[in-house]
Image (spheres, rainbow, N blue to C red):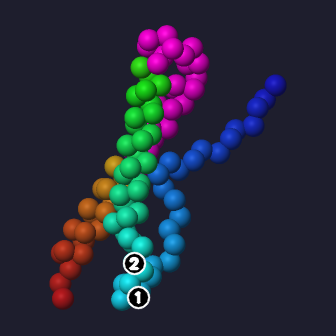
Amino acid sequence: MILPISPISLGGITPTTPATDPSSGSGGGGFGKALADSIGKLDQAQTQAEQATQQLATGQTSDVSSVVMQVEQASLEVQLASQIDTKAVGAYQDIFRMTV
């Protein structure tokens, strides 16, 4: 029997809301808040994967597939964060090299 493939989640990446006018006073945090939230979610995924691995190693759980899924999801989230970091640094360097 062939099971359907379920879509993967993007982990710490969530759609952003439109930017608000900084002079309006409501703020909302903007890019810094979104970045901090994403890093927090990445850290949480890593912690959950580490806990699942420890539970498997100590015999508290026997579901190997769920542990592997959590570890791989955390790994993919780290790879995505690394790619985003590389692109952001590259964009910054391109802007820095621009002549006015």
Pointer 2: what residue?
27
Helix, strand or loop status at disc 2: loop
Q: Dividing the image into 4 quarters, which one contains the N terminus?
A: top right
> What amino acid is labelled 1 in the image?
Ser
Please give left or right for residue 89 compared with residue 66 in the image.
left
Relative to 10, does residue 16 appear above or below in the rendering?
A: below
Q: Amino acid at mark 2?
A: Gly
Q: Quadrant of residue 27?
A: bottom left
Q: Main secondary structure of the magenta part?
A: helix
Give x and y (percent) for residue 13. 48, 56
Q: Which contiguous range is marked in magenta?
A: 55-80
Compare residues 35 and 10 and report the one nearer the observer. Answer: 35
Q: Residue at x 68, y 41 (%)?
A: 6
Q: Residue at x 41, y 88 (%)?
A: 24
**Distance of mark 1 from mark 2, alpha carbons?**
7 Å
Specify whether 99 is left or right of 87: left
Image: 98 above or below 92: below
Residue 24: image tag: 1
* In this rendering, position of residue 94 left or right of residue 84: left
Image marks 1 and 2: residues in contact by CB distance under 8 Å = yes
Asked where in the image residue 19 lies, by quadrant, the reply is bottom left
Relative vertical location of residue 87 with respect to residue 18 in this rendering, above or below: above
